[in-house]
Image (cartoon, rainbow, N blue to C red):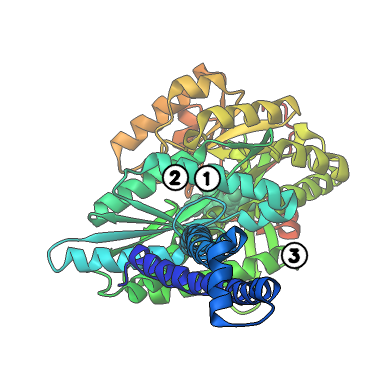
């Protein structure tokens, strides 16, 4: 490459020469005029003193007239002055040009650098952008060769569009900045963090799948605490897809494409992150189609609530019913909740689903009561609802719209849901309790909840998970657990429901343990509203009782 300074000084020298030659030309003209003046003056003097123009007259004029001597000096003066001033002007002009050239060059360099930076960085977060990320990924792969691993994490903010649409661009930008700072804090300097696209970030690290999983779980944990943007609380749902070189691909393109597959799968995974494997290609697409259809299903009434009774173990009075969602899919028929709830829980879809279930159960509950069926209706909430500060307000609105009495309703929350964020759950549970709802802890025994937390919560009911009740006849341990749980719950002032009661022997055992309520196929399988009403009216071993026990 050419040395720019060397090149500029050469340019300067030739410029100076050019300017000098122009200034010299003026000096030569000056000398010419001076010489002509001398000749004319001498001729004039000679004519004046001798009356003629002769050589001797000219010599005499030159020798005797002092004024001519001064005139004679003029060409030399012009010559000298011309040389001198032309050099000065040329040098001054040259230096000015030189300075300007250097300044211009520096500015061009700066502009070039800025342009280069802008082309490789995200303006909002200052993080490397997709093209720089891919470059670095390429380099890392080459550097890793056959013996080392490189792990890519693709991170998406799932509710980015929602935030952008509801809170506007500025808030969204502030949220992105906070998000990237939080990510940055989690990583060490050797990791590359990049913003690939609006809601997509990426991390590149030298390390194995386990390292990637560790970082992914740290990131998701860090996202659990609420963001505060312009004084409003904002929850961010993130999903992460993980791929590892060379295991999942030898080139950047393949790896990036597979990270996308893993990310799609992560959306429907409970953990929130997923490591790529080849079976995901097919598997995820089916479930993803289903989740895509769920949005429409909620809107177009493809969902229905089925009801399963809860009876008193002592006299079989139907005291309550649990609302269980079913999807009547136009192609696949009746889809059970286990096929779509877990994936809905990984997306913001669960909020719509819960809102739908709460609205529908309120309406059905009002209908039961209008028919004289005074039961308590239970509706299932999910972990996300307990993390959503707006949920109690949504419920309050639905109460007014449906005219349900909160005292007719029970909200079931799983142990696991409470434990994902105990403090926030506690806040929301308290609000729901204040509104008059009863609260039940579902699937008890599966979520390692701490008794200390349960004691803090204004709960009315504890539901022993089906897995313990199922095995009561054959498994002594489970029998002991069920019995102990009933005693413990009673000591905390809670009513107890045993789930999954499939036969009379279990029902009798529960009666012996003084379990309050039983629910299960033995009593009734979940039924559509009308059939459930019919079932209640037709069951000869069931008699009605108003709920006072709960
Ligand atoms: P869950 O809340 O534990 O509901 C009880 C599940 O056990 C229901 O499954 C019910 O049909 C089933 N079951 C009841 N008795 C018996 C029995 O005697 N034997 C056996 N083997 N199973 C019994 P389902 O309806 O498939 O629901 C599965 C899960 O889906 C529910 O578990 C609940 O966690 C979730 N779910 C259902 N509806 C909703 C809803 O509206 N919202 C939310 N967030 N989750 C829901
Ligand atoms: Ca339940
Ligand atoms: Ca349950």
| Residue 100 visible, this angle | no
Mark 2 and mark 3 residues within 8 Å of each other at the beta carbon: no
Task: Give the number of the disc on residue 179.
Answer: 1
Residue on which disc 3 sits: 299
Residue, disc 2: 183
Residue 471 in percent (x, y) is at: 36, 44
Left or right, 211 with respect to 523, comes to left
For marks 2 and 3 on the same chain, the one whose residue lies earlier in the sequence? 2
In the picture as drawn, the residue positioned furthest to the top comes out as: 491
Q: Position of residue 45 (x, y in %)?
A: 66, 71
Mark 3 or 1, nearer chain start: 1
Indicate the quadrant containing the C terminus: top left, top right, bottom left or bottom right. top right
> Could you give the CA–CA distance between mark 2 and mark 3, rounded to whole angstroms?
36 Å
Kindly report the distance in space between the C-alpha atoms of the residues bearing marks 2 and 1. 6 Å
Q: Secondary structure at mark 1?
A: helix
Q: Is residue 245 left or right of residue 367?
A: left
Determine whether the residue tagged by mark 3 lies in a helix, strand or loop: helix
Position in image of residue 490 (x %, y %) = 52, 21
Image point (78%, 50%), residue name:
364
Of discs 2 and 3, which sits in the foreground? 2
């Amino acid at each position: 490459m050419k040395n720019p300074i060397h090149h500029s000084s050469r340019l300067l020298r030739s410029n100076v020469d050019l300017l000098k030659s122009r200034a010299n030309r003026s000096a030569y003209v000056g000398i010419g005029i001076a010489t002509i003046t001398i000749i004319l003056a001498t001729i004039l003097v000679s004519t004046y003193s001798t009356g003629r123009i002769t050589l001797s007259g000219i010599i005499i004029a030159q020798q005797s007239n002092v004024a001519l001597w001064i005139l004679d000096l003029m060409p030399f003066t012009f010559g000298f002055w011309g040389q001198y001033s032309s050099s000065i002007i040329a040098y001054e002009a040259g230096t000015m040009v030189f300075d300007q050239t250097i300044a211009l060059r520096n500015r061009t360099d700066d502009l070039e650098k800025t342009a280069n930076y802008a082309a490789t960085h995200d303006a909002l977060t200052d993080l490397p952008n997709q093209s720089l990320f891919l470059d670095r990924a390429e380099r890392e792969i080459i550097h890793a060769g056959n013996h080392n691993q490189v792990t890519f994490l693709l991170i998406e903010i799932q509710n980015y569009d929602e935030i952008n649409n509801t809170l506007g661009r500025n808030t969204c930008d502030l949220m992105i900045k906070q998000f990237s700072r939080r990510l940055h804090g989690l990583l060490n300097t050797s990791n590359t963090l990049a913003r690939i696209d609006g809601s997509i970030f990426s991390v590149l690290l030298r390390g194995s799948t386990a390292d990637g999983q560790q970082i992914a779980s740290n990131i998701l944990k860090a996202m659990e605490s609420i963001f505060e943007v312009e004084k409003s609380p904002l929850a961010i749902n993130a999903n992460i897809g993980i791929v590892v070189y060379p295991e999942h691909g030898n080139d950047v393109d393949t790896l990036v494409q597979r990270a996308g597959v893993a990310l799609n799968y992560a959306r429907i995974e409970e953990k929130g992150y997923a490591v790529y494997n080849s079976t995901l290609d097919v598997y995820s697409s089916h479930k993803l189609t289903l989740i895509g259809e769920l949005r429409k299903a909620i809107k177009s009434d493809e969902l229905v609530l089925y009801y399963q009774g809860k009876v008193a173990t002592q006299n079989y009075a139907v005291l309550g019913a649990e609302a269980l969602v079913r999807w009547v899919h136009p192609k696949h028929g009746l889809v059970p909740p286990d096929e779509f709830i877990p994936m809905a829980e990984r997306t913001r879809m669960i909020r719509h689903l819960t809102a739908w279930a709460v609205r529908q159960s309120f309406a059905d509950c009002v209908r039961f009561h209008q028919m004289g069926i005074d039961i308590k209706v239970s509706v299932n909430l999910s972990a996300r609802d307990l993390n959503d500060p707006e949920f109690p307000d949504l419920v309050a609105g639905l109460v007014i719209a449906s005219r349900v009495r909160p005292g007719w309703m029970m909200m079931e929350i799983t142990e696991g849901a409470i434990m994902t964020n105990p403090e926030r759950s506690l806040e929301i549970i308290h609000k729901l309790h204040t509104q008059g709802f009863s609260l039940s802890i579902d699937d008890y025994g599966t979520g390692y909840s701490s008794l200390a937390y349960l004691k803090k919560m204004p709960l009315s009911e504890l539901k022993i998970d089906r897995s313990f009740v199922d095995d009561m006849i054959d498994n002594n341990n489970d029998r002991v657990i069920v019995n102990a749980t009933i005693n413990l719950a009673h000591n905390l002032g809670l009513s107890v429901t045993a789930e999954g009661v499939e036969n009379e022997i279990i029902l009798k055992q529960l009666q012996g343990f003084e379990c309050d309520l039983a629910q299960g196929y033995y009593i009734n399988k979940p039924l559509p509203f009308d059939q459930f009403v019919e079932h209640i009216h037709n069951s000869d071993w069931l008699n009605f009782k108003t709920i006072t026990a709960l």
